[in-house]
Amino acid sequence: MQVGLKIWRYDASTGRRALKEYELDAPEEATLLDCLDLIKDRQDGTLAYRKSCRMMICGSCGMRMDGGAVLACCTPMLEIARSGHVPTISAMGNLPVVKDLVVDMEPFWTKFKAMKPWLQPGYVEPPEGKEHLITQPEMNVIHKESLCINCGCCVSECNAMDSDPEFLGPQALAKGMRFVGDPRDAAAVERLEAYSGEHGIWECTRCYFCNERCPKGVDPRDAIAKLGAEAVRLGIDRDMGAKHAKWFVTSAKTTGWLRETELVPKTQGIVRSIKDTKFAMGLARKGKVPFPFPQHVAKDVGESRALYDLVKTQGRDGATGIVQGEKALARLGHGFHDEGRDPYGPGSFPRPFVPEEEATS
Amino acid sequence: MRAAIEAHDAGADVAIVSKLHPTRSHSGAAEGGINAALGNAAEDSPETHAYDTVKGSDYLGDQDSIEIFTREAPGDIYQLEHWGAFFSRREDGKLAQRPFGAAGSPRTIYAADITGHVLIQVLYEQLVKRDITVYEEYFAWKLVVDGGRCTGVISWDLLHGGLKTICAGTVVLATGGAGRLYRATTNAYACTGDGMAMALRAGLPLKDMEFMQFHPTTMYPSGILITEGCRGEGGFLINKDGERFMKRYAPNAMELASRDVVSRSEQTEIDAGRGVNGSVFLDLRHLGAEKIIERLPGSRELAMTYAAIDPIYDPIPVRPGAHYHMGGVETDSDGATELEGLYAAGEVACVSVHGANRLGGNSLMETITFGRRAGQAAAEAALAAGKPTAVPESAERDAERELKDLLARSGGERPWQVRDELGSSMLENFGVFRRGDKMEAQLELLAGLRERYATVRVEDKGEVFNSDLTQAIELGYLLDLASCMLTAGVARTESRGAHARPSDYPDRDDENFLKHSISRWRDGGPELTYKEVRMTRWEPQERKY
């Protein structure tokens, strides 16, 4: 197949950037990484990108295609080539570019290390020096977080990090959840305290770009939500983000509505809210602030309260109450393109048989 | 990483030099699991594990090392679990164990089918905990030998450019295998035998280089690995008619015979025209969607991405592909090599526990158990030796000059054609089946490739992330290793484990070849000698599965 690629080249020695276009002939099964290899071998040996396993487990080849992060090794080119589209390839976002498609991962690893990413055992003792006794469902709480390959695709797309480069970010926080949710870890409270500070859990803008772009179905945004829920459950709720979240629950439980007028003082506290009075008055003049009295109670508030009670009676406070990202789960299962098809039906591969059995039957 | 952790805990000042970030190493791609006789799923013992390993090795493994290996493995597994490894569990909360090829008991501990990934993460976590220095993306190029000792490594700093010399009391090689010698391989681009070649060039012996394991289930056409765990969970191998052909080759173990046996059976089917596109099929359909998604999600993901096959509905096209090098730098069971101050562990080393054929699940365990032992021994030796001596200036000057010459070259061809021809011809002439005349032809071809390599041109002349340069150096490593493998292969006129010569020497010859081959580089080529196998309690017997 004929493939066209536009690649943002960056020369570190001169600081010059240039968008270069390449055309190449590649086999139909070629991935983006295969195409880059063909360019490097046969057209331009100076093209720089990272690669190693070419089977989406080492996390080396994160880059952007048409502005969104991908792993080059699991991006098939056939459909793109057929459509005639010439995608633009560039280095990942939110990290300094070193050369062409290679970024400096140092800030990424610094945040990773800030999570104290190692098990602090002691919560339960393993019997006789053997393994801890833990059931699979207990471990499954952190199943998705444990899939992370540190490729940086989520960090590349993180909007919160775009505005605050010091934000711990989706990868580091997902790694944090991997330990907070581990039934063997004894440091959940200390961790949640640390992760709840400035640049922590509550700084996430919930844009879900990380979930969208993670090639492994880790769903970092869901991990951050789980951290938040665990923090609130354990009473670590001094941050405005935590108060904000708590008020959502209270408000929905009591009246079935989000009472925005009360949301501001509940989140920011009375003193800061008074400072914002002028701003609020302006909003009110334009009719943007609903009058708080008398309290407007939703017609079906009973449903909202029943939902709240259900979560409580099921004991799904904290991380276990966070619904897993359905989309990512579907991606993990890769959907069922052939759902309902009989694997042995007409047109399928023959049913296996053992030669001797066949001979005697 | 395992060696670094142990050396650190033993009190040494440790640094890791790696051409990749540590979590990007190819151990992370190991899928199926890691063997230790815990006896969680059925009765098992280190002795049974040792016997299976000896038999699997076609009696070429050193039995004293194998006994150490299987005895210490369970403790190492418990330690990994205490460090936080995310292993799969049984209903009673213990670690789950699955059946694997040629194993007398379900012995393979696993984390779904991403076991290597889970282990590499936990080791890196422990590395971060200890704040061990890592020289990331430093490409190790030369071992420094001074006064009969290994005193450091000269490396190329990929990210910033420039040669960097690291002095050390002791050096542990843990650089993995050389699967990139073959076009069809499960190995990463990084698996270019760097450590083996560096040791060879420093005058060290490589052991059993003719034994390259071909994994029976690598996907067509990419060569990407589909784990043995698929067969462990009950998967079938079938030919184009749907016949479970293993019945004719290993009537008892069927799909779970040892890897050399299964690979040969597949190749026989393919050669007899009972395959499609040079492949047979791995059929998981009967396992059902639920089991496939729970136990083998990674394999399904790989099949869907790289072969456009959903194994719930269709069988996966697979063929034998180069997977693991049983040979490597000769070491004792503490990882020590012939050169004082130099140690090796993992696939780069040949202890040897795998002999002529490795059992699935034994390689991850080897990296852990012998990584730990090598780290311990290297730390003790370094502490005893005192402060490392400075690397002689001449060594740095020579390296600098050699690098300049390589970069200054112009006019020659780019390395990729040499690389591709090497990969295709090795598969053709030194693959699952070998034959005297084909190996001789390959040696000749290799001489031509070496000649062409001597003039290859590096196009990137820059300092920053010059992978053009490192890839050219890696090709040189591969060519040296290919010479050793071929020379040892031609000389071994028998069939043993992964070295199968059905058309000229179909039988095992214990009288003449129950011994390790030893290759050294002398006057521009490998020189071959032999060394006895260390036996303790198991006499060679006929191998049947």
Image (tube, rainbow, N blue to C red):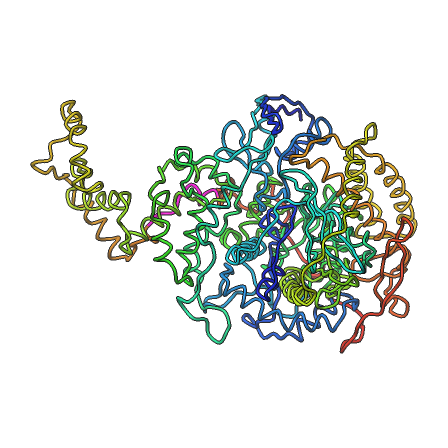
Q: Residue furthest left?
A: A294
Looking at the rendering, the stretch of residues picked out in magenta corresponds to: A322-331
Task: Please say whether residue B498 is one of the residues in the magenta stretch.
Answer: no
Residue at the image point whose x is 55% and y is 34% from the top: A63
Q: Residue A108's spot in the image, x, y percent?
A: 49, 42
Q: Is residue A328 magenta?
A: yes
Q: Residue at x 66, y 74 (%)?
A: B48
> Could you tell me what secondary structure mostly forms the magenta stretch?
helix
- For the point 28% across and 46% down, the residue is A239
Return the residue nearer the eye: A220 or A331: A220
Count of numbered badges drawn on the protein: 0
Left or right side of B491 for B119: left
In screen coordinates, is B294 left or right of A318?
right
The answer to whether residue A5 is above or below residue B122 is above
Viewport quadrant of the C terminus of chain B: bottom right
Q: Is residue A346 visible?
A: no
